Amino acid sequence: MTDDLLPPTPANHPDSIKKLAATLRRLDEAHRRYRVHAAKVVGMAPTDLSALLVVSENPGITPGALAKELVLSTGTVTAVVDRLEASGRVARVAHPGDRRSLHLQLTEQGTQIASALDEAYWYVLSTTGTDETIAGALPQLDGITEALDAVASEAVG
């Protein structure tokens, strides 16, 4: 079953690839734990926080696009947006050209939360190396992100 979903795997993996994969798994888990911690600090569920941050990065995103971005059902995203709207963090706004289409915007409170979380995240990241070492890692991380997204897009598409 997994053979249909994943690209072919070379017979011999360089040791560096195995180490990179293990490091990325640890990074993924550490990031998840950080997101759970940040959500607790601001009094939100982790999924709600993830949605708020996606709206922050994509002002005017539709609920359907938010569902795709978060890899959640539209029903689940409706409940998430309901909670965010009820708490005053996100507003549903009618599209100016099509009143049937709703878009999501952060409220002032949502913007303040997203900004505070960005600042805290940037601080944590700033402790991981010099500007040069961090900048040097970016092309590799971007390449990994693009490769993973390409495989995920093929599986969904």
Image (cartoon, helix red, strand yellow):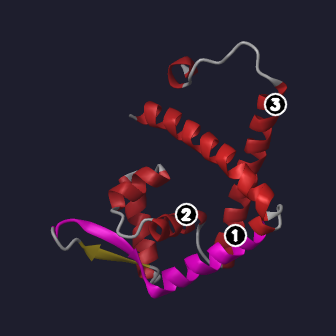
Residue 121, labelled with which disc?
1
Q: Which circle marks residue 50 in the picture?
A: 2
Q: Is residue 54 left or right of residue 136?
A: left
Q: Quadrant of the C terminus?
A: top left
Point 56% across, 68% down: residue? 49
- Which segment is the magenta one? 98-124
**For marks 3 and 2 on the same chain, the one whose residue lies earlier in the sequence:** 3
Q: How many marks?
A: 3
Observer-nearest of 131 and 36:
131
Residue flagged by tag 2: what amino acid is it?
Ser
Determine the CA span between mark 1 and mark 2. Answer: 14 Å
Q: Nearer the viewer, mark 3 or mark 2?
A: 3
Is 146 in the magenta? no
Q: Of marks 1 and 2, which one's residue comes earlier in the chain?
A: 2
Indicate the quadrant containing the N terminus: top left, top right, bottom left or bottom right.
top right
* Mark drawn on residue 154: none
